[in-house]
Image (spheres, helix red, strand yellow):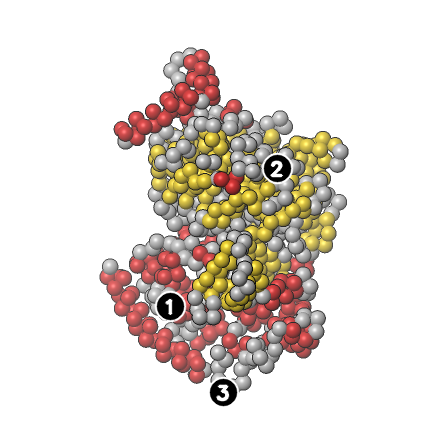
């Protein structure tokens, strides 16, 4: 109990530090920072010191219930993201962000919920934050990570040509429009994953009722039997698929169609090109 | 406890009174000299395992064939629209049910890690609940128990095998089957063949040897062990080849068939040049000796975690005009294989979704891995993803229509490995980019997909059960249980379950009523006609 209390006290201090650090990071001034958000920053990070017993308890719990999907070192796996490069984790303070995700799960992404106590959450958070600091070390056995520096083998000019030519990317995207400054918003693996398939983008759907009324909204749910959308006023509405006609915007299919056409060089080149699409220094951040 | 015991005795005596098999058991018991071992009333003897009656599901796959096809026909394509909930059982656990229940003498036995339930198959009420003290080791899932002569066999995350009395869950013995401190864990449902309890092991995050072990059901003593890979530390040799899924058995040939797991290090093959036998391999073993009869490697020199653990389905039938004893596997690497199970010779190799990692098929019928599609420092785009074109969820062979029906997962991913990732355990990283679920009905003689049924984005974890009446039971990516027409793939019935489905259906008949059992999340659902 004392351990927990001291941890909570400690995390409150960390919260204040983190707030400062985001401001500092935005200003890109090298300074003392708490847990580094990724391996990229490891040179400037000072290791956070969590009570070893707490980290140990979190490590045991993590290994038992989390490691299969997130990797033994929290470095991620096929079905669970790399937590050492997770924005949610970098914003977490003593489990305040990690806890709710663990306890509620993410049913839409296949993550089960876990009924962990406050102490267990504190231990998990301590372990994960410690891994964040250790992320530069070669960890035995577990799944590994990918650094932005690994993804620099392509040719940006060839990528630009692919973007405007064979890839057909320019049909929907523009370096001055939706992709302006994209490389400032996403880096490394995150950028590459979004480039290959933007998983979190919800397409538009058009529903036509028998009355002829048409509703266009953001697709929220679809199976064989039910179609649900968020309408322009923010309200969720659904229908039996047998009662209406619906059409999902096919834009995302273009990403799927490219999979069987890409060479690995195409992907590396395209990645190199996208990484040139940085926000001009001093310009306003993109929405 | 007294109440429980009384209830149990009542149930047991009721069974003996009303079921033909109960009568048979009572007769054979009466013929025995001396006191009858009480445990035998609980059944699952060798005869039941060889010829499961309609009111039983005594092993993980039901029968030994792995076909997950029932001869029951009360539920038909015409009346299945009336299917309704008979009962639901809430485990009140957060772990999803991945196990296939056993049904023996009217009682269902199923699991999640560290937990077994015995539940009345008629009413869904709990008879007992066994909880193992929470142990170390991976708690990723649990596939179920095995049963033999009234005793259950249950593997734990810390790699122990427990034998319990099926009546009341009292522990007869508990043995260690692998060293959890080295990184082994266990999750599979053992396979009972004769007086052998066959168990397999898991462990992908360390360089460990895989093995299959036969254990004496009475004593827990090891009868034999077959190692899938050489001892750890053998220069230039692979480790891995875990045995984490339940195999199948042909009593006539007296061979068990088992799929082995991927080699380790997982994504980096540099320290294990060559084919890496016997990883990603279907093996045929003598169940009495553990001696290898033949081996067919479905993924030579795997670097993508595509084990060949998926069910080896045994089918007797015509292949291109000749009667054959066949073995079929829809493998995680994206290929569907048909083998002659008498000798392991390949009859057919055909992809059942997008695959981009091979240079072709060799003269033995094995895919030839493309070195340019191994994981790389800057990433390679690979189909399918690490979860594979399918996985532990069961396929079904529809004997009526000659279709191999599988929950497939067309998918793409990026695989990375660099020297800094080392040569121990995972040794790289991979990320699924996109995938979907689709039920595919494969013509086993050609590999052509006769019909397909979309299941939704990312994919479904539901296995498949087919019936003689022409229904395919499965589930979609959103948690709907589905009954499809086995000839056309069209939906005949559905029910939203409220959670992800990560198990395979079973079916049985009790009191003249056919039940279909499905599960999603931590809930088991029994469906029947009104």
Q: Which mark is residue B492?
A: none
Frontmost residue, B334 versus B54? B54
Label 1 and label 3: CA atoms lie apart by 28 Å
Position above or below: A24 against B63:
below
Q: In which quarter of the image is residue A162?
A: bottom right
Frontmost residue, B145 versus A260? A260
Q: Position of residue A81 (x, y in %)?
A: 48, 62
Position above or below: B306 against A37:
above
Q: Is mark 2 on a helix, strand or loop?
A: strand
Q: Nearer the viewer, mark 3 or mark 2?
A: 2
- The residue singled out by tag 3 in the image is A282
Q: Is residue B405 left or right of residue A92?
A: right
Q: Quadrant of residue B11?
A: top left
Label 3 and label 2: CA atoms lie apart by 65 Å
List the single residue furthest toward the bottom: A282
Q: Where is residue B428 in the image (x, y as percent from the top left)?
A: 55, 60
Rendered residue at 52%/78% (across/down): A184
Mark 1 or 3, nearer chain start: 1
Position above or below: A21 against B485:
below
Mark 3, chain letter?
A
Confirm or deny contact between disc 1 and disc 2 (CB under 8 A).
no
Q: Position of residue B388 (x, y in %)?
A: 58, 52
- The residue singled out by tag 1 in the image is A92
Q: How crowded is mark 2: few (under 14 residues within 10 Å), some or many (20 or more)?
A: many
Q: In this view, does A276 lie to the left or right of B368?
A: left
- The residue singled out by tag 2 in the image is B398
List the single residue furthest toward the left: A2
Q: Position of residue A56 (x, y in %)?
A: 36, 58
Q: On the same chain: label 1 and label 2?
A: no
Pick the quarter of the image with the N terminus of chain A: bottom left
Rendered residue at 51%/63% (across/down): A219
């Amino acid at each position: 109990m004392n351990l927990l209390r001291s941890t909570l006290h400690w995390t409150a201090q960390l919260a204040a530090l983190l707030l400062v650090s985001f401001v500092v990071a935005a200003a890109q001034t090298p300074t003392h920072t708490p847990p580094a958000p990724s391996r990229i920053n490891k040179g400037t990070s000072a290791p956070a010191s969590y009570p070893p017993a707490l980290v140990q308890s979190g490590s045991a719990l993590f290994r038992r219930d989390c490691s299969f999907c997130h990797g033994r070192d929290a470095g991620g796996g096929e079905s669970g993201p790399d937590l050492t490069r997770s924005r949610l984790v970098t914003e977490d303070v003593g489990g305040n962000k990690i806890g709710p995700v663990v306890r509620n799960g993410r049913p839409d992404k296949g993550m089960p919920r876990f009924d962990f106590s406050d102490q267990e959450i504190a231990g998990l958070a301590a372990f994960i934050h410690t891994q964040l600091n250790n992320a530069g070390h070669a960890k035995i056995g577990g799944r590994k990570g990918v650094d932005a520096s690994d993804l620099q083998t392509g040719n940006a000019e060839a990528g630009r040509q692919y973007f405007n030519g064979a890839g057909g990317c320019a049909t929907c995207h523009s370096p001055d429009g939706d992709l302006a400054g994209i490389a400032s918003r996403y880096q490394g693996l995150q950028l590459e994953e979004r480039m290959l398939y933007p998983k979190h983008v919800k397409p538009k759907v058009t529903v036509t009722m028998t009355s002829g009324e048409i509703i266009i909204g953001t697709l929220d749910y679809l199976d064989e039997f039910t179609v649900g959308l968020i309408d322009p006023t923010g309200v969720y509405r659904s229908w039996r698929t047998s009662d209406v006609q619906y059409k999902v915007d096919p834009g995302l299919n273009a990403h799927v169609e490219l999979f069987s056409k890409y060479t690995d060089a195409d992907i590396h080149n395209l990645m190199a090109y996208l990484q040139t699409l940085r926000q001009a220094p001093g310009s306003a951040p993109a929405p | 406890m007294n109440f429980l015991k009384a209830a149990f005795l009542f149930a047991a005596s009721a069974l003996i009174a009303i079921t033909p098999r109960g009568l048979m058991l009572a007769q054979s018991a009466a013929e025995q000299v001396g006191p009858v071992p009480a445990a035998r009333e609980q059944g699952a003897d060798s005869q039941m395992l060889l010829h499961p009656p309609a009111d039983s599901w005594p092993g993980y796959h039901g029968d030994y064939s792995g076909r997950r096809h029932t001869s029951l026909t009360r539920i038909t394509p015409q009346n299945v629209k009336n299917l309704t909930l008979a009962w639901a059982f809430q485990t009140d656990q957060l772990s999803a049910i991945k196990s296939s229940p056993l049904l023996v003498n009217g009682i269902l036995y199923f699991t999640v890690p560290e937990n077994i339930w015995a539940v009345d198959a008629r009413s869904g009420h709990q008879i007992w609940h066994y909880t193992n003290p929470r142990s170390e080791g991976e708690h990723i899932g649990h596939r179920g128990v095995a049963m033999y002569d009234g005793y259950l066999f249950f593997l734990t995350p810390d790699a122990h095998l427990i034998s319990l009395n099926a009546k009341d869950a009292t522990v007869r013995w508990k043995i260690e089957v692998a060293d959890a401190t080295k990184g082994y864990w266990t999750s599979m449902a053992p396979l009972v063949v004769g007086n052998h309890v066959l168990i397999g092991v898991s462990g992908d995050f360390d360089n460990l040897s895989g093995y299959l072990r036969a254990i004496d059901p009475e004593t827990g003593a090891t009868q034999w062990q077959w190692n899938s890979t050489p001892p750890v530390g053998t220069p230039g040799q692979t480790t891995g080849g875990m045995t984490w899924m339940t195999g199948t058995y042909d009593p006539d040939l007296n061979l068990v068939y088992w799929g082995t797991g991927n080699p380790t290090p997982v994504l980096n093959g540099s320290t294990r040049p060559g084919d890496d036998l016997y990883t990603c391999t279907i093996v045929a073993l003598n169940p009495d000796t553990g001696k290898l009869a033949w081996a067919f490697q479905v993924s030579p020199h795997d670097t993508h975690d595509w084990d060949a653990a998926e069910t080896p389905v045994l089918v007797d039938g015509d292949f291109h005009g000749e009667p054959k004893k066949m073995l079929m596997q829809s493998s995680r690497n994206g290929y569907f294989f048909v083998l002659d199970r008498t000798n392991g010779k390949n009859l057919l190799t055909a992809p059942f979704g997008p695959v981009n990692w091979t240079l072709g098929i060799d003269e033995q019928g094995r895919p030839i891995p493309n070195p340019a599609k191994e994981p790389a420092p800057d990433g390679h785009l690979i189909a399918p993803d690490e979860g594979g074109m399918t996985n532990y969820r069961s396929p079904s062979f529809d004997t009526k229509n000659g279709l191999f029906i599988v929950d497939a997962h067309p998918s793409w991913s990026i695989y990375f490995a660099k020297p800094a990732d080392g040569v121990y355990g995972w040794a790289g990283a991979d990320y699924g980019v996109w995938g979907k679920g689709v039920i595919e009905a494969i013509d086993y003689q050609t590999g052509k997909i006769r019909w397909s049924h979309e299941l939704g984005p990312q994919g479904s974890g539901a296995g498949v059960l087919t019936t003689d009446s022409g229904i395919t039971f499965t589930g979609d990516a959103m948690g709907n249980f589905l009954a499809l027409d086995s000839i056309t793939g069209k939906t005949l019935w559905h029910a939203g379950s409220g959670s992800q489905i990560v198990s395979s259906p079973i079916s049985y008949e009790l009191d003249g009523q056919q039940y279909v059992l499905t599960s999603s999340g931590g809930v088991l659902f029994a469906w029947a006609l009104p």
